[in-house]
Image (tube, rainbow, N blue to C red):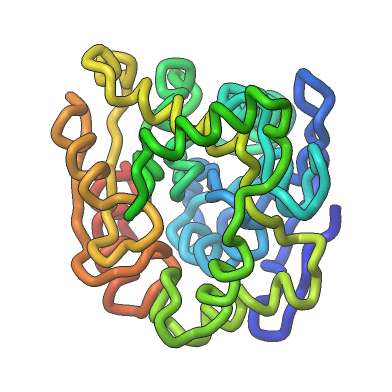
Amino acid sequence: MDLLDLPDNPVPPDTAVVAAVTGDGVTLRVARFPADRRPVRGTVVIFQGRGEQIEKYFRVVGELRARGFAVVAFDWRGQGGSARLVGADVGHVGRFSDYRLDIEAVRRQVALPDCPPPFFGLGHSMGGHILLAAAEILPPWLSRLVLTAPMLDFQGQSRARLRRIAGLVCALGLGATGTPGHGERVAAVRRFEGNPLTGDRAMHRIMMDLTAIRPDLGVGTPTWRWVLEAARSMDRMDEPDFPATVPLPVLMVNSGGDRIVSPAAVERMARRLRTAGYVLVPGAEHEVTMERPAYRAQFWAAFDAFVPGSAA
């Protein structure tokens, strides 16, 4: 349950690391960070992407604390320092709705008892997808959502084809096996030149160091069950009645240069939602909050304009 402390990515001061246990018995690693200034403006809960870990967000945590927010960050089931479901070499989930159990555990056991209201959600990639899919159950706890590069469709791959293949593999009882091609994807990510995550060299080095020093914080390829459940959840979001299930204000921040999730799908969803704001950051790679300063500044300007009381 400890956090990895690196010289260029130190654990923020006054951090508390605790465990939360979900309704189905999965232990989650959760961290609480107090605000750095007064008055305290509430709490931002970070909902990370697939394969990420709390440590990756230390710089984001610092930005939020300096704005007067307390912060909660946690590792989803099956990744980071939380309990693994079928082993560390694959990223697995039985159903995407299981992630709602993680949200509920963090809400009841950490956020509500120990953190100041009001509460806001900051979700990235898979975390943004999970928040949007679960939006109907989030109020009155979370009052606004900020989603960066939410995973609403796969980029450069046919969802229908992936769904068919994953469905067949799962029907054969092999849903917990990993998808192929992971080695090539990892190699592309680990090289700074041309990587699809960020153009910020220092942040890229931190991302790579985290799992090089602590391999247990990393996660391997998604399983075929994860792919199938992700595709089914995306299909649900495409249904005409889905926008009516999102009752709270949402800011969608789209990375114009994204090569991991589909920027076009993010833009389409922003048009469909009744309560959505939309910001495009042209040229930004997938990790806009961890990008070069010019891109990060655009994100934080949008965040400050959207989240009540956040401007300095």
Left or right side of 261 for 238:
left
Left or right side of 229 for 252:
left
User: How many numbered badges does the structure rendering display?
Assistant: 0
- Say which of 1 and 91 sits in front: 91
Residue 85 x/y as whole percent: 79, 37
The quarter of the displayed image where residue 99 is located: top right
- Image vertical order of residue 115 relative to residue 208, above or below: above
- Say which of 66 and 47 sits in front: 47
- Say which of 200 and 258 sits in front: 258
Residue 215 x/y as whole percent: 79, 67
Q: Is residue 300 visible?
A: no
Residue 33 x/y as whole percent: 65, 54
Residue at the spot x=29%, y=54% of the render? 304
Residue at the spot x=46%, y=32% of the render? 163
Residue at the spot x=54%, y=34% of the render? 166
Q: Quadrant of the C terminus?
A: bottom left
